[in-house]
Image (spheres, rainbow, N blue to C red):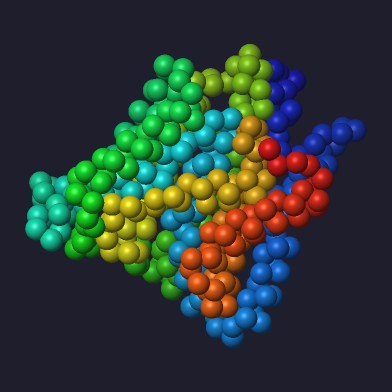
Amino acid sequence: MTETTKAEAATMPSVAVHGGRKQLSLARFRDLALVPPIILILIIGSFVSSHFFTWTNLSDVLVSMSWIGLLVLAETLVLLTGKMDLSLESTAGLAPGIAAWLTLPGGVHHGIHVLPGGFAIPVTLLVGVAIGVINAVLVVKLGLNAFIVTLGMLITLRGLLTGISSGQTFFGMSSSMTYVGTANWLGIPAAIWICVLAFAIGAVTLRYLRVGRSLYAIGGNVDAARAAGIRTDRTYMGIFVIASLLAAIGGLMLSGHLASVASSQANGSIFTVFAAAVIGGVSLNGGRGSLVGAFTGILLLYLVQNVLTFAGVSGEWFDFLNGGVILVVLVITRVISGRSRD
């Protein structure tokens, strides 16, 4: 067995080799630890309102969580390597914000109209990639702490969006910017397709491709991964760029859904992103977790919020109740999984 294979085998999350044959480990069932709470919420929701189990309502829930689902996916990939990216929420606001600023006319639209509307999506994606490159260079090439770098970037990007928009909201989006937030593919909103496909591609990559398994190896022991021949710096840089690109696409989906970009777009969403990842079983120390767990984490949070809305709970109580739910779920999953969530 080569050194690379040893490192990968030591960090595989769900398959253990014992007695010469592969066996399903308990880790695979930990990925599904949030399924019982989700089923419980679905049962409660069916009693709270007769409209809860309609396709219209469930579709609205999935569309609402799709954009932030991409941020959860992005953060999970970064966390698996043992790093973190706090700037994702600002990227989701600034990337479509710059696109709107450059393509919309002035006056009530608050733009400068130096580019046609057809450039909105390419500009959004380029801004996302540029932010990821800057984060990667500061963290990997200059060796700065990822938490501090991305915290500074979060504040900087938020301030930049507020500056170019003068604290206002961009209206009158081009059809290209609203497409992914309003289109339907095969009768299902495009935002749902994009979110589910992104998680599916990520899950397959993590489980079956060498580049995906290397994230677990790096997060588990970066020195061992480097000694085993894994190009850790290249992997770190690539994952920061991919994460920012996913955040930009998530911001585009949110802007399309709302048909606007507010100066506060996605503000505070990073707390929900971390909460979903952690209750989904992703370790903040790297090397452990799955995209299935992360997806069920964000799904659970949005289903709870939906049930609370049907129950007539005022929106002012959502943060308090969501925080309580997170703590309760952590306790439940701790008991089910038998392992601590660090």
- Front residue of 103/144: it is 144
Which residue is outermost to the right? 19
Q: Would residue 279 be found to the left or right of residue 255 on screen?
A: right
Relative height, residue 44 to residue 227 (above, below): below
Q: Residue at x 70, y 63 (%)?
A: 37
Picture residue at 11% right of the left edge, 50% below the top? 113
Q: Is residue 179 visible?
A: no
- Residue at (63, 32) in percent of width and height: 285
Position in image of residue 133 (x %, y %): 36, 29
- Looking at this rendering, what residue extends furthest in the bottom direction? 50
- Up the image or down, 187 lies above or below 264; here it is below
Which residue shows up at 59% across the image and 30% down it? Answer: 82
Which image quadrant for residue 108? Answer: bottom left
Q: Nearer the viewer, residue 153 or 191?
A: 153
Residue 238 x %, y %? 45, 30
* Coordinates of residue 171 in the picture (x, y in percent): 21, 61
Q: Quadrant of the C terminus?
A: top right
- Residue 18 visible in the current orientation: yes
- When the figure is inspected, residue 174 is found, relative to residue 292, above or below; the finding is below
Q: Nearer the viewer, residue 321 or 45?
A: 321
Q: Nearer the viewer, residue 160 or 119?
A: 160
- Tell whether 229 sits left or right of 233: right
